Image: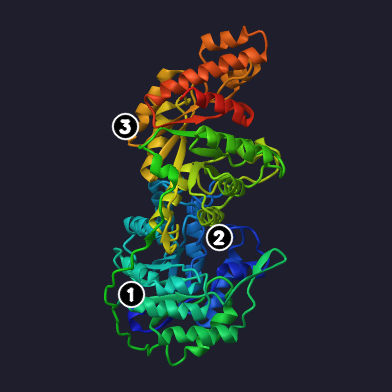
Amino acid sequence: MRLIQALESGVLLGDGANGTFLGERGFTQQPYDLANLLAPDLVRQAHEAYFAAGVDLVETNTFAANAIRLAGRDVNVRDLNLAGARLARQAAGVERLVLGAIGPCSRALEPIGQVTVDELKASVLEQAEALAEGGVDGFLLETYIDMEELRLAVEAVRSASDLPIIVSKAYIEEGEMLSEGLPARCAQEMTDLTGVVAVGANCIVGPQRMLDLVRMIAETTDLPILAFPTPGMPQLVRGAVAYDTSPEYFAKAAARLVDEGARLVGGCCGTTPQHICRLSQELKGKRRDAKPRVSRLREAKEREALAQTDPSELGLKLGHKFVVSVELDVPRGLNLDKLLAGARVLKVQGADVINISDGARARLRMNPSAVAALIQGRVGIEVTMHFSCRDRNLLAIQSDLLGCHAIGVRNILAVTGDPAHIGDYPSATSVFDIDSVGLVRTLSRFNEGIDMAGYSLGIKCGFTIACAYNPLPIDPAFEIDRLKRKVDAGVHVVYTQPVFEPGLAEEAVEVCRKLGVPCLVGVLPLRSQRHTEFMHNEVPGVRIPERLRKQIAEAPDDAAALKIGLAEARSLAAAIRKCAAGLYIMPPFGSAAIAQQVMEGLA
């Protein structure tokens, strides 16, 4: 095929960033791929400008033109890709080459995120079929971070077309990552993918760091190497990402990539026809006289085993003693005196762990990691910190988890979180990059010593991973399936919502037993008729027996109602002790005194 022949003939010069060109000329709609339909002449001009700069090939303006990224947008994905391919082909003519650009879907795959394998492959297949119909000479799958997503994308492209495939991964700019040999390992994985004719790296790093990447990739593969760096480090100027690297510097630095073995060079985000034109001039004399590359395969070295962090006390107790966990409410503001005093009382009473929520019902409260650290440091009792996916993107989630581990907060209960619009600040933005299943998988990866991009954490974390389970869901099959997915992702212990019947507690324990995880059954002492009717009628997953509702309704006052609620909770706790791994007490108003009275019934 023409692309393979071209790669075998010598060094090829690729184009720069289409988005940068379009943005500089006034097209600001995102993604820039929309210009294929909304400003086709401008896209054609971009391709023509790069050919005028001296390139051998261009990429279609379709990097983000997939159904997952464009979900909810009024755009025909097939038409967008077909137009992109045809515009590039019109600029290239019959002699020059066109690569169909396909980027990652921009959302995490299951079990981290919610994109299924079938959805991903269908999205890539749709792109590949349209690009092939539009006349591309091959495909460039670029800027991938997740190697599993890249593998699935290659499979989908191969099912659509026999045209050659070039694959490229994006790497962070970090010397530690290079020293661990990640680029070489990834290059080997990419080389082994069926239908791949060239491998490489693009985006994120400038030409100097790209030089290190090319060297390492060259040690692992005999395939042609692609190298498309950015001009340098970006900056934010008036809300827009900008690069301030001269074409002269970029060209001289990028030309050195050929000396290290790159066969296909070009530019990524921030590069313009001016950058590529200067690079073309620098490459004169090298274009058809590429330096012979000798594959310097490294001797396989066993990677040094990472140290294992000791498990938390909760992790050690599970399965060996009946665990008592009590949830205490974090107050508004900064005064935690009552909370800390309550934790001390519960510790003396024999509680094993305190549960702290993470902005439940989207209410503004102190960061739970700070609260957890204060309780552990000042009271000396472990905390299970609820961790919500609502307020953090995938980067912040991992950053906060590293911080939690560093300060000794090792028990994490993964929750998706309540949407922001129901809380104190309805205009606040909910993030939800991942849900509770994805958070469990992230924690599990941390316990393996790696982050979600595959980079080493230096040690294996020691998180005890918890999740929630609703024994009375609207859709039981769906709830049990989600629980199974959480367990498969790495959960160590399950906390249930409050139950009010021994039989329901036993059913919840049995569900968890079949999945091979211990269960802490929730108990909530009722304190008044109003509280009882609210819980029964307005809180999803809560069912209070008619007999108990009637008893509390007939109580002469709230004090008498609370006495009934406490007696019921103590009786239920005693029943739970006979079947479950532990008890999860949720006292009203976070009352340590009420929780203490429930615990007294366990003596």
Q: Which mark is first along the chain, 3 or 2? A: 2
Q: Is residue 271 left or right of residue 338?
A: left
Label 2: which secondary element: helix
Q: Residue at x 58, y 50 (%)?
A: 392
Q: Residue at x 63, y 20 (%)?
A: 531
Label 1: which secondary element: helix
Q: CA distance from mark 1 to mark 3?
A: 54 Å
Q: Residue at x 56, y 28 (%)?
A: 595
**Residue 170 drawn at (x, y percent):** 46, 67
Marks 2 and 1: in contact by CB < 8 Å? no
Q: CA distance from mark 2 to mark 3?
A: 49 Å
**Is residue 343 or residue 231 the one in the foreground?**
343
| Type of amino acid at the residue the image marks with label 1 | Ile
Quarter of the view holding residue 423: top right
Q: Which mark is first along the chain, 3 or 1? A: 1
Q: CA distance from mark 1 to mark 2?
A: 27 Å
- Position of 440 relative to 210 (above/below): above
According to the picture, the residue beneath numbered tag 2 turns out to be: 33
Q: Residue furthest left?
A: 299
How many other residues sit within 10 Å of disc 2, few (<14), some (14-19) or many (≥20)?
many
According to the picture, the residue beneath numbered tag 3 turns out to be: 514
Q: Nearer the viewer, mark 1 or mark 3?
A: 3
| Type of amino acid at the residue the image marks with label 2 | Asp
- Position of 296 relative to 491 (above/below): below
Label 3: which secondary element: helix
| Type of amino acid at the residue the image marks with label 3 | Lys
According to the picture, the residue beneath numbered tag 1 turns out to be: 4
Q: Residue furthest bottom?
A: 285
Q: Is residue 367 visible?
A: yes
- Position of 193 relative to 374 (above/below): below
Q: Is residue 585 left or right of residue 483?
A: right
Marks 3 and 1: in contact by CB < 8 Å? no
